[in-house]
Amino acid sequence: MSPSQCRSARALLDMTQPQLASLAGVGLSTIVDYERQRRSVSDDAINKLQLALEAAGITFINANGEGEGVRLRTPKR
């Protein structure tokens, strides 16, 4: 998952950074720094973010050579 996919997924879910931090069990600064590409974030933290977003209904798209994206798998609640 890239930083832009993380931002896009949150937008689709109308989810704030603090809400994602709570769901993923990571610090808010981790999400802020990752999305703004301020510093390297551990693979473990990125995995937690991705798993939380997937549990909320996001599907990550990594099209071979056609770009990456996100899709909302289920309707928002």
Image (cartoon, rainbow, N blue to C red):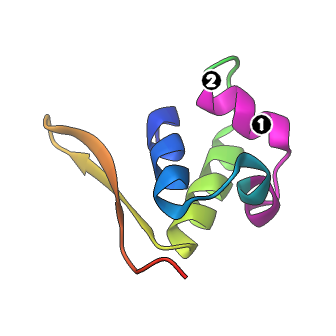
Nearest the camera: 69 or 18?
Answer: 18
* 53 relative to 74, above or below: above
Residue contact at pointers 1 and 2, CB within 8 angstroms? no
What residue did someone put label 1 on? 30
Amino acid at circle 2: Arg
- Distance Cα–Cα, label 1 vs label 2: 10 Å
Residue 7 % position (x, y): 53, 42
Q: Secondary structure at mark 1?
A: helix
Give, as a single range, the part of the protein colored magenta: 21-36
Q: Residue at x 82, y 61 (%)?
A: 22
Q: Residue at x 56, y 63 (%)?
A: 53
Dominant SS type (magenta): helix
Residue 34 % position (x, y): 65, 31
- Among all residues in the image, which is located at the extreme top? 38
Mark 1 vs 2, N-terminal side: 1
Is residue 66 part of the magenta span, yes or no?
Answer: no
Q: Quadrant of residue 75?
A: bottom left
Residue 15 % position (x, y): 63, 58
